[in-house]
Amino acid sequence: MARRLINRRPGRVGAVLLGALPFVVLAAVYLSASRARLAANPDDRLLPAPGQFLDAIVRMAFEPSRRTGEYLLWTDTLASLERIGLGVSVAAVTALCIGILTGLLPYARAGLSPVVKAFSLIPPLSVLPILFITFGLGEAAKVMLIVFGITPFMTRDLQQRTLEIPEEQLIKAQTLGASSGQILLRVALPQILPRLIESVRLGLGPAWLFLIAAEAIAAEEGLGYRIFLLRRYLAMDVILPYVAWITLIAFSADTLLRLLRRRAFPWTAASA
């Protein structure tokens, strides 16, 4: 049985090498294709050489803009982080409150679950024009798109996790004289908070999608705005590093949340 492939697991070094292999292959394919296109046309802008990426990064990050005097990469990054941070925070608090209430209280579940389910089925990007009409073209509409896009599924996830709390725990707490509020705060909440962090991790991907969509339509700064602005000029030497930068930020945020869960709720590490 041990010789079967499904029973074999890579060691730590093997796992790192296997994880790096796809990136090495992708880099090799890109470099080969870039070299071929630049050999045929030195002015080709579709697949820039690594040196062009480096020049673009230095220009965007360490040289002030001739028009505004700002360091564009850092200005865009700060603007996008403010929007996504606010949107995800509002969504997390809203999802936690509604999810734990609807999971624990039958009356709350009967009243709120249908509307949460209905909102979760609405394609978020379809309401973007409504948000711009309602909140204007400022920051509120962009933040609300993130909130609208990720809150419903986070709420349903937390509600389901609350419903999965063993009935024996709730009965035992009531037997010991705990009120509904005490059960919510001292039985349900400690078990739901680790799941809230996981929900935020899962919501970061869609949140970035909604942020970039909103910035592409109505913004004057931001990572999504810059990507779609430079798309007009086929500036792939800037667009690709911006995409890589967004990926690095998202990866860092996911890692920090995973470490936060491990540090704050160590008893969940085995199931993570």
Image: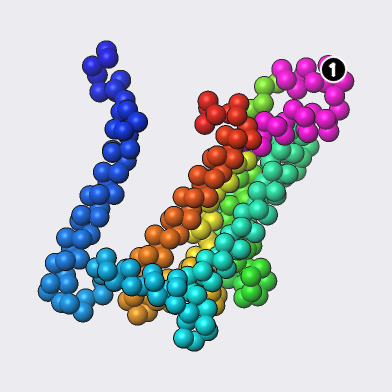
Seen from this angle, which residue lies furthest front?
62
Q: Position of residue 127 (x, y in %)?
A: 58, 64
Residue count near mark 1 (Cα–Cα under 10 Å), binned few <14, some 14–19, many ≥20: few
Which structural element holds mark 1?
Answer: loop
Is 202 covered by the magenta stretch?
no
Give the amino acid type for the residue marked by disc 1 in the picture.
Leu
The colour scheme of the drawn protein is: rainbow
> In the figure, 155 relative to 223: above or below?
above
Quarter residue 86 falls in:
bottom right
Q: Residue at x 73, y 44 (%)?
A: 97
Q: Which residues are magenta?
A: 168-195
Residue 168 falls left or right of residue 34: right
Residue 72 in sight from this viewpoint: yes
Q: Is 4 or 80 nearer to us in this picture?
A: 80
Is 175 covered by the magenta stretch?
yes
Residue 114 in sight from this viewpoint: no
Q: Residue at x 37, y 65 (%)?
A: 241
Residue 154 falls left or right of residue 74: right
Q: Position of residue 29 (x, y in %)?
A: 20, 56
For the stretch drawn in magenta, the main secondary structure is: helix
Residue 185 falls left or right of residue 79: right
Circle 1 is placed at which residue position?
A: 176
Q: Is 1 or 121 nearer to us in this picture?
A: 1
Q: Is 27 or 220 nearer to us in this picture?
A: 27
Q: Position of residue 240 (x, y in %)?
A: 35, 65
Quarter residue 143 falls in:
bottom right
> In the figure, 252 relative to 263: above or below?
below
Seen from this angle, which residue lies furthest top?
1
Residue 163 falls left or right of residue 122: right
Q: Position of residue 66 (x, y in %)?
A: 46, 86
Q: Quadrant of the N terminus?
A: top left
Seen from this angle, which residue lies furthest left?
40
